[in-house]
Image: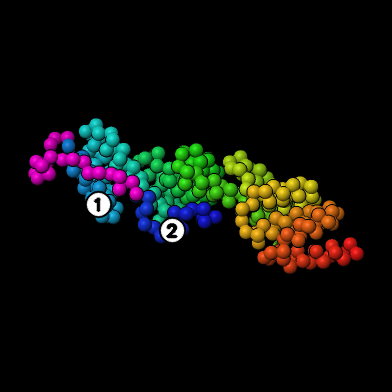
Amino acid sequence: MNSVYSAVKRTLKFTSLALLIALVALPASAQETKTVIKEGQEFKMKYNEALSAAKAKDYDTAYTAFGEAAELAEAANQSDIVSRSHKVMAQIDNSRGIRAFKQENYQQALDFHQRGIELSNGYVPNHYGKAKALQKLDKMEEALPIFQAVMGMGDRKSASSAERTVRGHYVYIASTQLSSNNSNPTKTNAQAAIDALDEMELYVEADADVFYYRAEAYKTLANYAKSIEMADKALEVHRGSRADKAKIFFVKGEAHMFSGSNQAASDAFSNALFGSYKPLAEHYLSELNSSGE
């Protein structure tokens, strides 16, 4: 499921610090630049120092300097500089959290993302990173409300990642249940899969995989009409390859076959002749053709 965490998969380059490009040095008078800083204006020099370090990719120095600039700016009632400094610090914390996550140090990742949130609550990637770290720490109950919140924070990229992560979590549970006993799940397994997917839909909408696993679960429960219905829904929204689509036609074919609808089963299996499903589909087609003679 780490695949939904796209920032972790890429080589860490602190790309989240793109905001720095938009930041400009604060103006200082010639006298300030040479020797003397006017009273209450120290934050300008410290901020510019932090900005220079960040542009030079010396993020440790930049982080410390932005923190000092924020303290000085707060004392001078310069809330805009406090906010700007804290946002860049939050971006650095996010990048540090990503690096810790990639190194499988999930508690450290959580700490970095939490600190980033405290500095700049509106910087959404830290909320997503925090939820991902909690998930890895087996605290999904804590992570789920955060993922859900991320989906409504206005950051399209983070929202999409959160949605995929939540869906993937429940699909994994369902697929694990349905692959039990060497892919011969019990009715208890099937019901557990359905329950997991029901819970998932409290947070995100179903996709083709969700409908496919529902079809598999209902087939195990011998509710063939419902299995076929779910397979048809999966086919409607499927956007993958023909080989991937074969699994949906295959479960639809099985449901038709077990319910005695041989012609419909044959039609479905004929569309499942791709990838790993091809041998089994050919086997069932042979049996159906023999029974029809």
Q: Is residue 31 left or right of residue 292?
A: left
Label 1 crowding class (10 Å Cα cut-off): few <14, some 14-19, many 20+? some
> Residue 221: x, y in percent?
77, 50
Q: Position of residue 147 (x, y in %)?
A: 51, 43
Query: Camera-side residue: 49 or 211?
Result: 211
Q: Residue 247: x and y, percent?
A: 69, 58
Quadrant of image for the N terminus: bottom right
Residue most extreme to the top: 77
Q: Nearer the viewer, residue 24 or 175?
A: 24
| Residue placed most toward the observer, 77 or 14 | 14
Instruction: Identify the residue shown where x is 21% and y is 47%.
Output: 49
Taking 97 as reference, is 278 left or right? right
Determine whether the residue tagged by mark 1 lies in a helix, strand or loop: helix
Q: Could you tell me the amino acid type at mark 2?
A: Arg
The mark that comes first in sequence, 2 or 1, is 2
Q: Quadrant of the C terminus?
A: bottom right
Q: Residue at x 54, y 49 (%)?
A: 165
Count of numbered marks: 2
Residue at 68% across / 45% down in the picture? Answer: 195
Q: Secondary structure at mark 2?
A: loop
Where in the figure is residue 96, as x and y percent of width and height?
A: 37, 53
Residue 53 is marked as 1
The residue indicated by pointer 2 is: 10
Q: Magenta stretch: give its range.
A: 18-40
Kind of residue at disc 1 = Ala
**Camera-nearest residue between 181 and 168:** 168
